[in-house]
Amino acid sequence: MKSIPVALGDRSYDVRIEAGLLACAGEALAPLARGRAMPIVTDENLRPHLATLQSSLAAAGIASEAILLPPGEATKSWRQLEALTDRLLELGVERSDHVIALGGGVIGDLVGFATSIVKRGCNFVQIPTTLLAQVDSSVGGKTAINTRAGKNLIGAFHQPALVLIDPDLLATLDPRQVRAGYAEVVKYGLIDDFAFFEYCEANAAALLAGDSEARAYAIAHSVAAKARIVGEDERETSGKRALLNLGHTFGHALEAETDFSDKLLHGEGVAAGMALAFAYSARRGLCPTQDSQRVAAHLRSVGLPDGLAAAGITASGAALVEHMLHDKKMAAGTLPFLLARGIGQTFLDKTVELADVAGFLDAQSR
Ligand code: GLY
């Protein structure tokens, strides 16, 4: 068992990673349950994982009640938040109790936010079932729902009490979802870890084909990187945590252009967004063109989009920049961009002119 600490003072917790962990989760959760029941929130597609988890809890003497929600992004809504918080209150959840989020980013974000407000805050445990949730959203305490005004605009920082990652759960995940999650893995190499990017280049094919050693290593390395960054800048105030948004500003515009639909999964938007961030950095003379081309080639080689065309985007630069104006990172009329001086050398640039970005995007689609 690999255990990675997220060091946040009295909000510190461990991320435990082990193949087969779901089937023995009860043992890991018993010290938190302390004889109390643990509600499990999951989605209707995850019944087999729910059955495994409930057997394990029962074997450890922990009572559990399943709350099943519809799968999909639409579940991160006021309506589902209201229904979930009502149900948790009906179940008599107390502040010291722990609610389990068993699912991908949608379930993790919703349960995290719900538990941040039930009785002014109770505890939750993340058991992420997608690669994207395992390497990114389950760690770090960002929780949110979507509203008419946009994605993730209503939420809270609320850290889980424990994260249990079972890489074996990826075996039943749609390969497209695994590939999309892989974008967030390679992101850690692009941010500040050239050696890990080289590892990704050499091992991505094995990882995506299901090699358990490659998956376990990549997940642990990614979680350790995220834990380090979150430990330094929990609330994204110093600029360090903002590095985790590499590719997200461009990616957000592409996702908005496709109505946040299955036409472009979040991880696919991030992949195309990272390729664009490197291409834009190269165009500005900040980053060697070879590095930008190397990033695009790697993304292409694993079947991820490496730019606008591969992401199926035909919109003009002006239209894409218009989406960026609604980005929640917009501050005092300026949108900070994550750019790069090379692979593993990402930095935050607050001087980017959106008209220049529009011109760059138009040139990309010609
Ligand atoms: N997914 C970016 C972050 O957790 O800060």
Image (tube, rainbow, N blue to C red):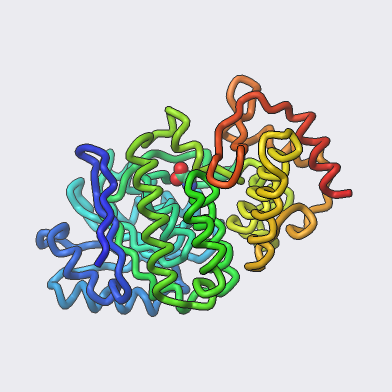
Residue 157 to residue 114: above or below: above
Q: Residue 289 location, x and y as percent?
A: 72, 45
Residue 333 to residue 93: above or below: above
Q: Residue 212 location, x and y as percent?
A: 41, 76
Locate the N terminus and report the quarter of the image it occupies. Answer: bottom left
Residue 38 to residue 238: above or below: below
Left or right: 216 as drawn, with respect to 79: left
Residue 128 to residue 55: above or below: above
Near-viewer residue (56 or 71): 56
Residue 318 visible in the displayed image = no
Number of marks present in the image shown: 0
Q: Residue at x 66, y 48 (%)?
A: 291
Left or right: 203 as drawn, with respect to 47: right
Q: Residue at x 60, y 70 (%)?
A: 176
Residue 188 visible in the displayed image = yes
Near-viewer residue (131 or 229): 229
Near-viewer residue (346 or 46): 346
Q: Residue 74 location, x and y as percent?
A: 56, 56
Q: Residue at x 48, y 54 (%)?
A: 195
* The residue positioned farthest toward the top in the image shown: 332
Left or right: 107 as drawn, with respect to 181: left
Q: Residue at x 51, y 75 (%)?
A: 206
Q: Residue 198 location, x and y as percent?
A: 53, 58
Near-viewer residue (354 or 279): 279
* The residue positioned farthest toward the left in the image shown: 35
Q: Quadrant of residue 334?
A: top right
